[in-house]
């Protein structure tokens, strides 16, 4: 072999070795940078998510299964209750995130912390999770012990903990959906890097039309004397009379943001119970949406400004002939319109034993 050829081959070999060495060095740098990225997250200011305590029932899971699947997961804790309209409006987003990210390391846990007594019944909650298509674990925090462990005071509330159990995000109420999903994506990415898992790179966000609240609307109106404490919401001169049955008489003049009753109603801590065979509820409100939380079996006929509901205002749960039939403890939508406006609404009720808990507005 000629000297020139040998020299050329040796030169090529040297270059190849050099390239390989440089590549290895840069690869090492990349690994160091990845490790550095992980180490740069200072978690000393973050709290650890508390244990789930005082759980009365487990739905879509068992205690043993839940403990097992929680390990090393990014966990979205959703504190909710099924008759809360604000909670209900968040559920399409949460179920969509569960569908999209559960295979990538996200675990959603619904912490059902009840506002009313009937929400402690596991059959009622099971009905609600079936209605809303909830497949993730739901735990019944009937004594509010986990609620207290999170130091929570609101429905709904979302906490997101990373795979090491540190709470990295906290959101109160509705909204913030894009921000929340980006946090989910970020924490899944961190988890993947930590365990050397190749994550699915999909930054597209869930697209669901968000409910638009009106700036000026009637506040939530409570029918239970304990819940309505320090709130001037019952307009009848007879007022609240704890644990007594009161005959409420018709009043001609009514004020905005107050409700008025006729008939015999028993005053409970969290509701009013119709003792007579029939009765009415009247109020002057401002909103584009009206919902009621009720229990027992009854037939409700709805009137707006003295007329049967027109198509413009008919709620999603109103059947034909302007009637709402209630048969189980739940939240029902009775007014649903595109814009906010003020109206006098009257509900004529047939059904002894009917219980009214609250009006909510949107």
Image (cartoon, rainbow, N blue to C red):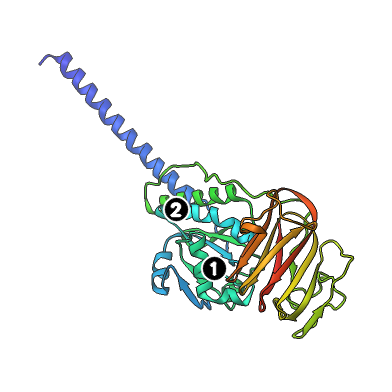
Q: Secondary structure at mark 1?
A: strand
Secondary structure beneath disc 2?
helix
The quarter of the picture where residue 170 lies is bottom right
Residue 40 horizontal/vertical position (percent): 52, 51
Q: What residue sits 85% from the left and 78% below the top?
A: 238
- Furthest toward the right, the residue is 253
> Which residue lies under the disc numbered 1?
111
Q: Quarter of the image containing the C terminus?
A: bottom right
Number of callouts: 2
For label 1, count other residues whose C-alpha is less than 10 Å away and answer few (under 14), some (14-19) or many (20+): many
Residue 129 is situated, as x and y percent measured from the top left of the image, at 50, 64
Is residue 84 visible in the rendered image? The answer is: no
In the image, 61 versus 345, the foreground residue is: 345
Residue 325, numbered circle: none
Residue 148 lies, in percent from the top left, at 61, 73
Residue carrying label 2 = 99
Who comes first in sequence, dot 1 or dot 2?
A: 2
Residue at (59% x, 46% y) in the render = 209
């Amino acid at each position: 072999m000629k000297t020139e050829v040998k020299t050329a081959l040796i030169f090529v070999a040297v270059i190849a070795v050099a390239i390989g060495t440089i590549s290895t060095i840069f690869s090492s740098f990349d690994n160091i940078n990845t490790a550095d990225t992980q180490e740069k997250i200072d978690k000393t200011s973050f709290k650890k998510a508390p244990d789930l305590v005082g759980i009365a029932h487990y739905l879509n899971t068992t205690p043993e299964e839940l403990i097992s699947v929680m390990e090393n997961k990014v966990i979205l804790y959703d504190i909710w209750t099924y008759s809360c309209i604000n909670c209900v409006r968040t559920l399409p987003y949460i179920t969509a995130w569960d569908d999209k990210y559960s295979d990538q390391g996200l675990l959603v846990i619904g912490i059902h912390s009840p506002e009313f007594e009937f929400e402690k019944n596991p059959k009622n909650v099971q009905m609600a999770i079936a209605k809303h298509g909830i497949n993730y674990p739901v735990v019944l925090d009937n004594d509010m012990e986990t609620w207290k462990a999170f130091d929570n005071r609101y429905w709904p509330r979302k906490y997101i903990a990373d795979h090491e159990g540190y709470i990295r995000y906290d959101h109160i109420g509705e909204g913030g959906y894009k921000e929340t999903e980006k946090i989910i994506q970020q924490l899944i990415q961190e988890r993947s890097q930590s365990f050397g898992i190749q994550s699915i790179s999909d930054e597209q966000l869930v697209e669901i039309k968000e409910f638009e609240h009106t700036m000026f609307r009637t506040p939530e109106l409570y029918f239970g004397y304990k819940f309505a404490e320090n709130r001037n919401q019952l307009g009848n001169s007879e007022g609240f009379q704890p644990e007594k049955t009161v005959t409420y008489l018709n009043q001609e003049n009514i004020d905005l943001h107050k409700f008025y009753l006729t008939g015999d109603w028993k005053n409970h801590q969290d509701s009013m119970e119709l003792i007579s065979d029939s009765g009415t509820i009247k109020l002057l409100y401002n909103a584009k949406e009206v919902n009621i939380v009720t229990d027992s079996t009854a037939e409700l006929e709805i009137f707006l400004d003295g007329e049967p509901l027109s198509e413009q205002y008919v709620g999603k749960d109103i059947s034909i002939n302007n009637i709402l039939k209630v048969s189980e403890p739940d939240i029902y939508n009775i007014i649903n319109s595109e814009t906010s406006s003020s109206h006098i609404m009257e509900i004529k009720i047939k059904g002894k034993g009917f219980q009214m808990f609250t009006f909510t507005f949107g």
